[in-house]
Amino acid sequence: DIQMTQSPSSLSASVGDRVTITCRASQSISSYLNWYQHKPGKAPKLLIYAASSLQSGVPSRFSGSGSGTDFTLTISSLQPEDFANYYCQQSYSNTRTFGHGTKVEIK
Amino acid sequence: QVQLQESGPGLVKPSQTLSLTCTVSGGSISSSTYYWSWIRQPAGKGLEWIGRIHASGITNYHPSLKSRVTMSVDTSKNQFSLRLSSVAAADTAVYYCARELSFDWKLDVWGQGTTVTVSS
């Protein structure tokens, strides 16, 4: 399996802060990396696909970058509705894997 | 607009088989453009990919679950299904079905999830 390691596992931030979450793959996955937002009791929501492409309807404050093994999700100005869990997921291998998640909490 | 809805028993006894169905509305499950996936989330833990199936019958399963998982598609009902045998308490989770687009390889549509508890 390709292992996906996210950091940090949690963070506290204030509205308006710039937030960065990183994801590292155990081997090169080119740009086959997606990011999801997940709130309790809701379905996960696709934010970024192919490492840096913004899913339709997702606010432009979300952005992704990286290729190979190292990837980043950035929220340029944190909004109240952005407090949630975030997961990276590789789609390079036929066996998909998720990172363990990053919980973004209110400071 | 495509929507997915999971259904199935909320309680399964240990050693029995968990069976869930995902009904696809607003689109055809027979389209070659998509794979149909199952993901779960145990309480307090992260998302775990279980596997996926294409309408052609192609399947990919997580290696740790492969011996217990079977997925199928029923094009006449526009549904796909998950069967997980020999369940144990560790299989207690919220189970999600999702659609994976076969050229961007992204899980772009998800069901709301259904909770399955394994307990006697």
Image (cartoon, rainbow, N blue to C red):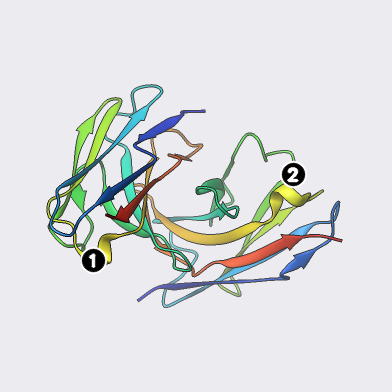
Q: Amino acid at mark 1?
A: Pro
Alpha carbon distance from label 2 to label 1: 41 Å
Task: Count the labels in the image.
Answer: 2
Is B64 located above or below residue A106 in the figure? above
Residue pictured at 39% horizontal, 40% vertical: A9
Q: Amino acid at mark 2?
A: Arg
Q: Is residue B55 left or right of residue A7?
A: right
Name, please, the residue furthest toward the front: A107
Q: Chain of mark 2?
A: B
Q: Which residue in the structure is indicated by mark 2?
A: B68
Q: Quadrant of residue A37?
A: bottom left
**Nearer-the-camera pick, B61 or A84:** A84
The secondary structure type at the circle numbered 2 is: loop
Residue pictured at 42% horizontal, 78% vertical: B26
Of circles 2 and 1, the one toward us is 1
Give residue A7's position: percent from left, percent from top. Answer: 34, 35
The C terminus of chain B lies in which quarter of the figure? bottom right
For label 1, count other residues whose C-alpha is less than 10 Å away and answer few (under 14), some (14-19) or many (20+): few
Let me know if residue A84 appears in the view: yes
The secondary structure type at the circle numbered 1 is: helix
Q: Chain of mark 1?
A: A
**Nearer-the-camera pick, B73 or A32:** A32
Give residue A75's position: percent from left, percent from top. Answer: 18, 51
Residue pictured at 52% horizontal, 28% vertical: A1
Name, please, the residue furthest toward the top: A27
Q: Which residue in the structure is indicated by mark 1?
A: A80
The N terminus of chain B lies in which quarter of the figure? bottom left
